């Protein structure tokens, strides 16, 4: 394809963004427009020409949103949608994946197996939910990542302490208590990369700690994409609206459960073990979106 | 031969000289070798560094 302008919005150039820029540089006929979201401003209403960052993004054929902040990503995705510029993941998908209450609802509605989970809004009702789920169970921020503040509650005393601290020391979002049954997993969880309805790679993240994020030091190893895994991951991705997604799974005693779905995948630790060119596939998918629009 | 471009900048925390690799991009994070502060490359050319912001609640995947 010739004369394609691909926008990359990011706050920082991490390993992922460098790999994406390298994958874009490999594509002849692609012009890359980098926009720093710290500098960006855009006209929502009222007079005024588009500020520089807005003009640059409006002129793009497709945009890769790679902001660190989920809230920014959602705002940016809505701007792009309003301007008619496609992004790799749509605003609604970012909103669903960025909120564990919505993710779990979407998975449950679609009949995708996921651990039992509840939501409550006061310490007292959250404690009731904990007792109903049974110990151990897990409390998580509704929005958050890298395993931050994901806590395992093993008894009533601990549960009271954690929930009360959240209620007193946290903000309004911390009083949306997202509670999930603990899954007795084999020292690892699975992370599948689904791009355009295809499970392109799966890794296992192994750690001696029960929280197995690679951001927290877990080690990644490649896992074969079985037909069962592929089917389940594609269903999970479709349940949240589809796109380019990272599906996290837990291997429970009774089978695979989808824990959550991430819309801004990190892949630095997955390319090596799997040998799959994830950044290249993301770029290919972005270009496919442009192609599809040009063919209409 | 032309002179090498300047490839080091002062750490905003401890003033140590932080060398930037030739392929450094604006927006990258580099550690200061002396005080270990996380630094953000504001511009690679000319090299300008700022303290990287702390992780916020909604950062991540
Ligand atoms: N219900 C559970 N049972 C067992 N382990 C769990 C459970 N929930 C989370 N974990 C462990 O904790 C880790 C972090 O949890 P989770 O992925 O829900 O949080 P996160 O902060 O959203 O992480 P991510 O960066 O993947 O978005 C998981 O990778 C898994 O190893």
Image (cartoon, coloured by chain):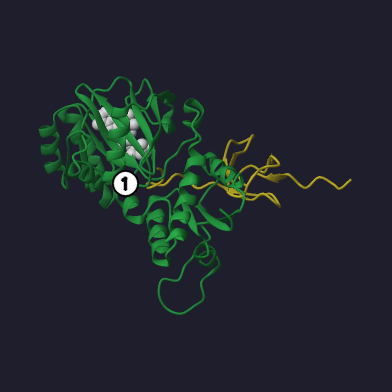
- Name the residue that disc number 1 marks: A97
Structural crowding at the residue carrying mark 1, measured as other residues with C-alpha within 10 Å and reported as few (<14), some (14–19) or many (≥20): many
The subunit carrying tag 1 is A
Between A104 and A155, the one nearer to me in the picture = A104
Q: Quadrant of ligand 1?
A: top left
Between A97 and A175, the one nearer to me in the picture = A97
* Hue used for the chain lettered A: green
**With B13 as the anchor, is A127 left or right in this view?**
left
Which residue is rendered at x = 49% and y = 45% of the image?
A: A284
Is B56 rendered above or below residue A251?
A: below
Is ligand 1 less than 8 Å from the beta carbon at label 1? no
Residue A218 position, x and y percent, is 42, 26
Colour yellow maps to chain: B
Which residue is rendered at x = 45% and y = 47% of the image?
A: A285
Is A252 rendered above or below residue A242?
A: above
**With A76 as the anchor, is A30 left or right in this view?**
right
Q: Quick check: can you spot residue A149?
A: no
**With B45 as the anchor, is A235 left or right in this view?**
left
Residue A275 position, x and y percent, is 50, 28
Q: Residue furthest front?
A: A295
Q: Residue furthest bottom?
A: A47
Residue A167 position, x and y percent, is 23, 45
Is A5 rendered above or below residue A54?
A: above
Which residue is rendered at x = 55% and y = 46% of the image?
A: A13
The quarter of the picture where residue A147 lies is top left
């Amino acid at each position: 394809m010739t004369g394609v302008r691909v926008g990359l919005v990011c706050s920082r150039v991490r390993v992922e963004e460098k790999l994406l820029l390298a994958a874009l540089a490999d594509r002849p006929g692609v012009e890359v427009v980098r926009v720093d979201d710290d500098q960006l401003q855009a006209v929502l209403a009222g007079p005024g020409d588009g500020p520089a960052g807005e003009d640059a993004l409006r002129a793009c054929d497709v945009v890769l949103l790679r902001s660190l902040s989920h809230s920014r990503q959602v705002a940016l995705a809505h701007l792009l949608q309003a301007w008619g510029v496609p992004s790799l993941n749509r605003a609604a998908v970012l909103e669903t994946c960025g909120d564990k209450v919505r993710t779990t609802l979407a998975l449950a509605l679609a009949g995708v197996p996921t651990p039992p989970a509840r939501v409550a809004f006061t310490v007292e009702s959250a404690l009731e939910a904990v007792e109903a789920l049974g110990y151990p169970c897990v409390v998580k921020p509704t929005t958050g990542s890298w395993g931050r503040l994901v806590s395992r509650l093993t008894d009533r005393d601990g549960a009271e302490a954690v929930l009360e601290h959240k209620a007193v020391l946290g903000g309004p979002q911390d009083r949306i208590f997202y509670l999930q049954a603990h899954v007795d997993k084999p020292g690892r969880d699975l992370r599948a990369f689904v791009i355009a309805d295809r499970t392109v790679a799966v890794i296992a993240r192994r750690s001696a700690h029960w929280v197995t994020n690679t951001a927290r030091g877990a080690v990644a190893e490649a896992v074969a994409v079985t037909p069962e895994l592929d089917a389940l991951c594609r269903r999970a991705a479709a349940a949240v609206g589809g796109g380019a997604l990272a599906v996290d799974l837990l291997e429970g005693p009774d089978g695979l459960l989808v824990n959550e779905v991430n819309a801004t995948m990190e892949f630095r630790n997955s390319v090596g073990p799997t040998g799959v060119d994830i950044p290249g596939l993301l770029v290919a998918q972005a270009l496919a979106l442009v192609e599809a629009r040009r063919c209409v | 031969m032309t002179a090498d471009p300047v490839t080091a900048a002062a750490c905003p925390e401890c003033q140590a000289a932080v060398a930037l690799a030739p392929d450094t991009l604006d927006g990258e994070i580099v550690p200061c070798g002396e005080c270990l502060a996380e630094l953000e490359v504001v511009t690679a050319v000319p090299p300008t560094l700022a303290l990287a912001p702390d992780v916020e609640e909604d950062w991540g995947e």
